[in-house]
Image (cartoon, rainbow, N blue to C red):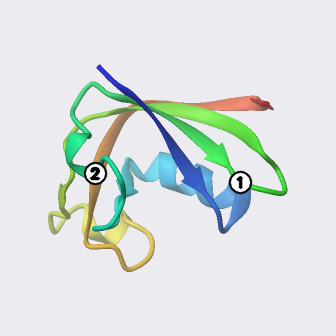
Amino acid sequence: MAYYIFNVIEGGAAQATRLLRSGTWAIGPLEPHRDALAPGDVALVYLAAPERVFIGRAELASAVHDWTPAEAPASPGNSHSGVALTQYEEWDPPSR
């Protein structure tokens, strides 16, 4: 099991919460460590400036893969690939 930080740069807490609840997280083709992500790994979800807080965690249910027809509509943006999430937690209040 490895630990990663998933950053949310645009959209703030609302976008991050939507991503967690969708059960998917987009991973772009140029993301470092993309090929290392594996089921059972844990991601901490971080909101970038100006918030600069951790807002939750999720366990990865899959390695990076192209979206299935069922996952594609739930995945925000125009990404074509990512990971499935399981056992996510939203932290209220967030942690610094």
Q: Residue at position x 37%, y 80% from top?
A: 78
Q: Secondary structure at mark 1?
A: loop
Amino acid type assigned to the residue bearing label 2 in the image = Arg
- Displayed quadrant of residue 40: top left
Residue 13, x across and y down, in percent = 71, 53
Residue 81, x across and y down, in percent = 25, 64
Instruction: Report the disc number at residue 34.
Output: 2
Amino acid type assigned to the residue bearing label 1 in the image = Ala
Residue 67, x across and y down, in percent = 20, 64
Q: Residue at position x 55%, y 56% from top?
A: 18
| Image quadrant in which the N terminus is located | top left
Report whether 27 appears left or right of 16: left
Above or below 64: residue 92: above
Q: Secondary structure at mark 2?
A: helix
Residue 52, x across and y down, in percent = 78, 46
Instruction: Report the disc number at residue 48.
Output: 1
